[in-house]
């Protein structure tokens, strides 16, 4: 069986408890929790991902690699990545999803689905029932 290599099986990979609490406080202080339904948060998250995408649209591959450090794009990249993270953490909090558990489970599933010795260097789709899923994608 293929396993994800980590410092320890139970070592947290993602700890967003402090951020989730801060976001809840921020929303509560503004009486915005009434607007933070999962539907609204997913729509806002999608909008922020779109804004991040817009930065990279029409960039060359080379420019895209440098976008996080290029003075012309770095601040916008940082701002949009932060917005994406904030909405993702808020969404997971509202839904009661433990992001650390979800990430660890997904990494284990991906390690089984894409064994390194079989897929190294290949962009081919996994050989499974999910014929339309690209490597690294989120199969349904």
Image (cartoon, helix red, strand yellow):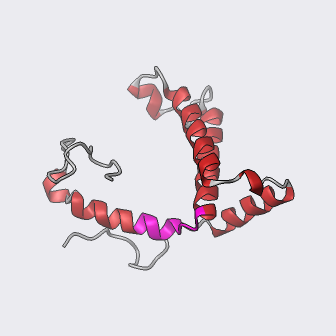
Q: x and y percent of residue 94 in the render? A: 63, 62
Considering only vertical position in the picture, is 123 above or below 64?
below
Give the residue displayed 57% in from the left and 61% down from the top.
92
Dividing the picture into quadrants, the one containing residue 46 is top right
Q: x and y percent of residue 25 in the render? A: 79, 62
Q: Nearer the viewer, residue 76 or 85?
A: 85
Region of the chain picked out in magenta, as a range: 95-104
Q: Nearer the viewer, residue 48 or 5?
A: 48
Q: Is the magenta region chiefly helix, strand or loop? A: helix
Give the residue displayed 76% in from the left and 57% down from the top.
33
Give the residue displayed 63% in from the left and 49% down from the top.
41
Q: Is residue 122 left or right of residue 19?
A: left
Q: Is residue 125 left or right of residue 54?
A: left
Considering only vertical position in the picture, is 1 above or below 120?
below
Give the residue displayed 49% in from the left and 73% down from the top.
12
Q: Residue furthest top?
A: 58
Quadrant of image for the N terminus:
bottom left
- Please say whether residue 106 is visible from this viewpoint: yes
Q: x and y percent of residue 54 in the render? A: 54, 27
Considering only vertical position in the picture, is 39 above or below 63?
below
In the rendered image, residue 90 lying in the magenta stretch gets the answer no
Dividing the picture into quadrants, the one containing residue 21 is bottom right
Please count the marks in the image: 0
Q: Is residue 11 left or right of residue 4?
A: right
- Please say whether residue 81 is visible from this viewpoint: no
Q: x and y percent of residue 71 in the render? A: 62, 29
In the rendered image, residue 101 lying in the magenta stretch gets the answer yes
């Amino acid at each position: 069986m293929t396993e994800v290599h980590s410092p320890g099986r139970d070592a947290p990979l993602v700890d967003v408890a402090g951020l989730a609490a801060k976001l809840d406080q921020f929303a509560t202080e503004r009486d915005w929790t009434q607007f933070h339904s999962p539907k609204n948060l997913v729509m806002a998250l999608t909008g922020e991902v779109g804004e991040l995408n817009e930065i990279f649209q029409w960039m060359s591959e080379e420019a895209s690699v440098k976008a996080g450090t290029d003075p012309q794009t770095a601040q916008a990249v940082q701002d949009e990545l932060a917005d994406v993270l904030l909405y993702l953490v808020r969404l997971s909090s509202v839904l009661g999803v433990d992001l650390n558990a979800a990430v660890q489970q997904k990494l284990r599933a991906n390690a089984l689905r894409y064994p390194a010795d079989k897929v190294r260097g290949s962009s081919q789709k996994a050989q499974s029932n999910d014929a339309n899923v690209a490597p690294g994608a989120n199969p349904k």
